[in-house]
Amino acid sequence: MISGEYCRLMARYNSWQNNSLVTAADGLCDAGRWQDRGAFFQSIAATLNHLYWADAIMLQRLMGNPRPEETLGHSLTSPSDWDDFKMCRAQRNQDIEIWAAQLDDTDLQGTIIWYPGDGATRLERPTALCAAELSNHQTHHRGQVHAILTAAGATPEPTDLSKLP
């Protein structure tokens, strides 16, 4: 389905696109980043926080933690300080790149088991599917943020994978 090389490419793309959005959002005031703009998570900041925490949870699942929600919260309001968010996001990008750098194709075989939400329901999915979902989920919500930023007058970089530096 996918390979370790694909995961490394998507990890690089993730970092590039997150940096693009953060740089574009730097041009807005704090209130502008938190302003309800009619998106699924309302604001730019809340959507970026959702991505930050969802990335952490999925990465923990991929690394073998079946209950990441027991130790990782998911918050649309935290980090609330923009400088803290930028630091945390950069570290999460690095964590994803380190995970991907260590993968070989056999690591993507098999299944991942986890217990989301209330911890009672056991889910089992192919590892490769979960790795692909990490990238797909990121792309989906970053597209929303890209559109919101553009409507707010900011200029994030293009999202085309072929333009990855």
Image (spheres, helix red, strand yellow):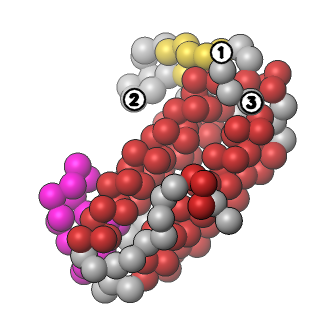
x then y, percent, for residue 24 = 43, 77
Q: Secondary structure at mark 3?
A: loop
Q: In the rendering, which numbered label is found on residue 111?
A: 1
Instruction: Answer above or below: position of 130 versus 16.
Output: above
Identify residue for label 3: 3
User: What is the total number of numbered labels drawn onto the structure image?
Assistant: 3
Residue occupying image coordinates x 40% and y 60%: 48
Taking depth in this image into account, of 63 and 39 the one nearest to the observer is 39
Quadrant of image for the N terminus: top right
Residue 73 showing in the rendered view: no
x then y, percent, for residue 23 = 49, 78
Amino acid type of the residue that numbered disc 2 sits on in the rendered structure: Gly
Marked residue nearer the N-terminal end (1 or 2): 1
Q: Disc 3 to disc 2, how far (Cα)? A: 29 Å
Marked residue nearer the N-terminal end (3 or 1): 3
Taking depth in this image into account, of 158 and 82 the one nearest to the observer is 158
Instruction: Answer above or below: position of 90 versus 109.
Output: below
Marked residue nearer the N-terminal end (3 or 2): 3
Q: Nearer the viewer, mark 3 or mark 1?
A: 3
Q: Nearer the viewer, mark 1 or mark 2?
A: 1
Residue that lies at the very extreme toward the front in this rendered image: 162
Q: Which residues are magenta?
A: 30-46
Q: In the rendering, which numbered label is found on residue 117?
A: 2
Near mark 2 (Cα within 10 A), the count class, few <14, some 14-19 or many ≥20, is few
Specify whether 26 is left or right of 95. Answer: left
